[in-house]
């Protein structure tokens, strides 16, 4: 009986050892597959065509903002007239205000405001504007720029200023900025646009 008991005990121990061996083998195999997969995928280069940026929602893109300063400046002061993150606007940056938003919500006293402008810009108020022309002091709209905005001379030197039309009479062209010149020593507001 003792031989048989010893034999049964040996077979039981063998069965336990086999089961432990199978479990250990399976765990080692899973670990090996995981490591091999990581190595294969980690060194794989990413191709630009595989990376897709999310499409921008056009309704979530805020329009560029602009404003007319409430304070006035001489021709040589315009480069410091605009608040942080804004610069003196070129007429070409303001050409189509329907694609812009007037920044009426700046700090009090920064942006020009009229009583009936709502969220739009003031009309009939001139502001200095960049022309895109070389330095000039002549009296020609679109060229005059107080010598590239460095002059405040009383000696017949001019800069260009513009305003949105105030005259809505029959036949008036509502889509064109009205431009004129002012002498560089005169105090005029400045059109500013977001950087």
Image: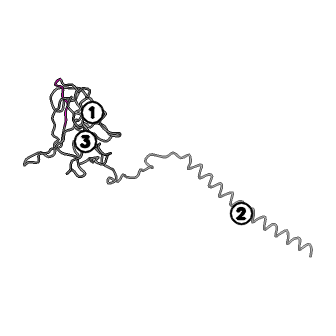
On the rendered structure, is 43 left or right of 8?
left
In this figure, which residue is indicated by the disc labeled 3? 68
Residue displayed at 16% across by 26% down: 138
- Kindly identify which numbered label has been placed on residue 78: 1
The mark closer to the camera, 3 or 2, is: 3
Ranked by sequence position, the earlier of labels 3 and 2 is 2
Left or right of residue 1: residue 127: left
Q: Name the residue under label 2.
A: 23
Say few, some or many: other residues with alpha carbon within 10 Å of mark 3 (under 14 / 14 to 19 / 20 or more). Answer: many
Residue 16 at x, y percent in the picture = 78, 67
Estimate the spatial distance between the alpha carbons at disc 3 and disc 2, rounded to whole Å: 78 Å
Position of the C terminus, as image quadrant, is top left
Give the answer, above or below, for where 49 lies relative to 2.
Answer: above
The residue most toward the right is 2
- Considering only vertical position in the picture, is 34 above or below 150? below
Query: Would you say residue 157 sits in the magenta stretch?
Result: yes
Q: Where is residue 115 in the image (x, y as percent from the top left)?
A: 20, 50
Residue found farthest to the left: 170
> Is the C-beta separation of discs 2 and 1 under 8 Å?
no
Q: Which residue is drawn at 61% across and 51% down?
A: 36
Q: Where is residue 21 in the image (x, y as percent from the top left)?
A: 75, 62
Could you give the CA–CA distance between mark 2 and mark 1, rounded to whole angstroms?
80 Å
Contact, mark 1 vs mark 3 (Cβ under 8 Å): no
Residue 87 located left or right of residue 115:
right
Q: Rounded to the nearest whole Å, what is the CA distance between mark 1 and mark 3?
A: 12 Å
Q: Position of residue 6 (x, y in %)?
A: 89, 71
Q: Is residue 65 magenta?
A: no
Query: What's drawn in magenta, residue-wise?
Result: 155-161
Q: Residues within 10 Å of mark 2 (few under 14, many from 20)?
A: few
Kindly indicate whether the residue at mark 2 contacts the one at mark 3 (C-beta within 8 angstroms). Answer: no
């Amino acid at each position: 009986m003792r031989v048989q008991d010893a034999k049964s005990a040996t077979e039981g121990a063998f069965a336990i050892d086999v089961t432990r061996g199978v479990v250990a083998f399976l765990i080692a195999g899973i670990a090996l597959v995981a490591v091999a997969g990581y190595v294969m995928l980690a060194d794989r280069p990413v191709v630009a065509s595989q990376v897709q940026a999310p499409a921008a929602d056009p309704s979530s893109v805020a329009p560029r903002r602009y404003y007319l300063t409430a304070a006035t400046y001489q021709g040589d002061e315009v480069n410091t007239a605009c608040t942080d993150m804004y610069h003196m606007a070129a007429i070409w940056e303001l050409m189509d205000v329907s694609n812009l938003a007037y920044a009426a919500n700046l700090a009090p006293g920064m942006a020009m405001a009229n009583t009936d402008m709502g969220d739009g810009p003031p009309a009939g108020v001139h502001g200095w504007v960049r022309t895109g022309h070389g330095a000039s002091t002549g009296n020609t709209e679109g060229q005059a720029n107080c010598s590239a905005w460095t002059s405040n001379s009383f000696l017949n030197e001019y800069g260009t200023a513009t305003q949105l039309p105030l005259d809505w009479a029959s036949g008036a062209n509502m889509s064109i900025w009205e431009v004129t010149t002012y002498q560089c020593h005169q105090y005029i507001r400045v059109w500013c646009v977001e950087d």
